Amino acid sequence: MKADLIVGLQWGDEGKGKIVDLLAKSYDYVTRYQGGHNAGHTIVVDGKKLALHLVPSGILNPKAINIIGNGVVISPEALLKELKQFDSIDGKLFISNKAHLILSYHAAIDQAKEKQRGENAIGTTGRGIGPSYSDKISRSGHRIGELLDTQTLAKKITEQLNENKAYLDSLGVAIPSFDSLKEELELYKKELSKFIIDTTDVLWKALDSQKRVLLEGAQGTLLDIDHGTYPYVTSSNTIAAGACSGTGLNPKEIGKITGIIKAYCTRVGNGPFPTEDFGSDGDLIAKNGHEFGTTTGRKRRCGWFDAVAAKYACRLNGCDDVAIMKLDVLDGFKTIKVCVAYEIDGKRVDTMIGDVTKAKPIYEEFAGWDKVKGVKEWKDLPENAKKYIKHLEKLMGVKVSLISTSPDRNDTIFLGNEE
Ligand code: GDP
Ligand code: IMO
Ligand code: MG
């Protein structure tokens, strides 16, 4: 058996949560492989909304077991807060003993560094994601499995922090005392130990016994640490390849890869965004799409669909198919634009390979439509909406398998071979 994968193709918030929840009924395991509580994945069922940050979006499915893989960075404080909203999660959640810890000093460092960057700030979520991954890569981080011996862990952490005291002082970051840190870690151990195991072993056994596994990406391709708009990116490999290192599955164990993409573009935080619309169209997309962050509440920057970026993302991830989200948000626009190439230093460029800081969009225009919201079948879509989808499919070179027409789980069109 192979594991299927869901990955964001833009700058995050594409609607991954909705799709993972929707598909989870056909899977035995749903697994997060990177990121942390910078993610905010929203699920809406019968008008009831659930925002998830660390818990995989399969959690509402009675059957699926949810796994937080080794590539995730975990704030136990944020996780415990999130778990409070569920009655019983025992046996439904497992956490990799190799996932790295985020503690409060990571968030303090993240926020202090952002302040220091001033106008060059990345616009992080301030959750400590970058500092935790930095510790991991520099081999001074701590795995959540180390919680099993809190005495040793608290000692190691306080010693490390004290070795870096001058730097932390310069950032205004306080070092916790050994006793307070040990007490905090004891609480996390008490509450979380039962979930912590080697999840690679669980996933291998699952695939070996023909169980179905769904991998849930966080953030999006254009925020990838290597292939995104560096340095305005997150600190993990958000692309499909990250799922292998983030779970222990090998590349041959990855099956179908589905890219999730909005019918337009958004971005939270700073950095290049070629199709950003600073006028009334951008405002209207933000208003219709309720484009405010699930994690930080920040207003998302909005603009038109970027087919150059989409093609790049499909190639990087090896998408087998694509789900187009939030098509209803474009209801009522007279004209809809799609970026088909960039102009960079006076030259036409049709790839996102290279620096897009100075890229200006070259648009094609499409006639708009009125009512897509809530449509559940292809045949009920307005003709212009059908044309739009078919055109995006052609530009991306990847089949559209699903169209989402509202936040609700049920307002979804599954596509076969419609013409
Ligand atoms: P994720 O991070 O990729 O899971 O996406 P978020 O949950 O951060 O943001 C997507 C937002 O759009 C959420 O508020 C969803 O409830 C909402 N949403 C998802 N699909 C649709 C859709 O087809 N139409 C509309 N109007 N909203 C949607
Ligand atoms: P989901 O999973 C959108 C952005 C931040 C910032 C950059 C770095 O909900 O799609 P970080 O805190 O990760 O160091 O911030 O990445 N960012 C996201 N944007 N959706 C997300 O997650 C994001 N997670 C991080 O806004 O620009
Ligand atoms: Mg989100």
Image (tube, rainbow, N blue to C red):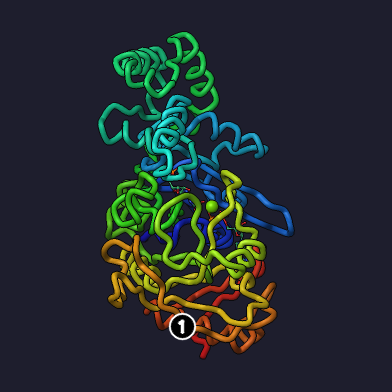
Q: Position of residue 373 (x, y in %)?
A: 68, 73
In the figure, residue 289 lies in which quadrant? bottom right
Q: Position of residue 303 (x, y in %)?
A: 52, 67
Which residue does the image show at 46% across and 68% down from the upper left? Answer: 275
Which residue does the image show at 50% across and 47% down from the upper left? Answer: 39
Pointer 1 residue: 364
Q: Is residue 362 left or right of residue 416?
A: left
Q: Is residue 220 above or below residue 139?
A: below
Q: Is residue 215 left or right of residue 343?
A: right
In the figure, residue 376 lies in which quadrant? bottom right
Badge 1: residue crowd in 10 Å (few <14, some 14–19, many ≥20): few
> Three-letter amino acid code at disc 1?
Glu
Which residue does the image show at 38% across and 68% down from the upper left? Answer: 309
Q: Is residue 185 above or below residue 201?
A: above
Which residue does the image show at 50% across and 30% down from the upper left? Answer: 76
In the image, is the residue at mark 1 within 8 Å of ligand 1 by its beta carbon? no
Q: Can residue 99 be seen by looking at this rendering? A: no
Q: Position of residue 59 (x, y in %)?
A: 58, 48
Q: Position of residue 75 (x, y in %)?
A: 48, 32
Observer-nearest residue: 220 or 351? Answer: 351
Count of residue discs = 1
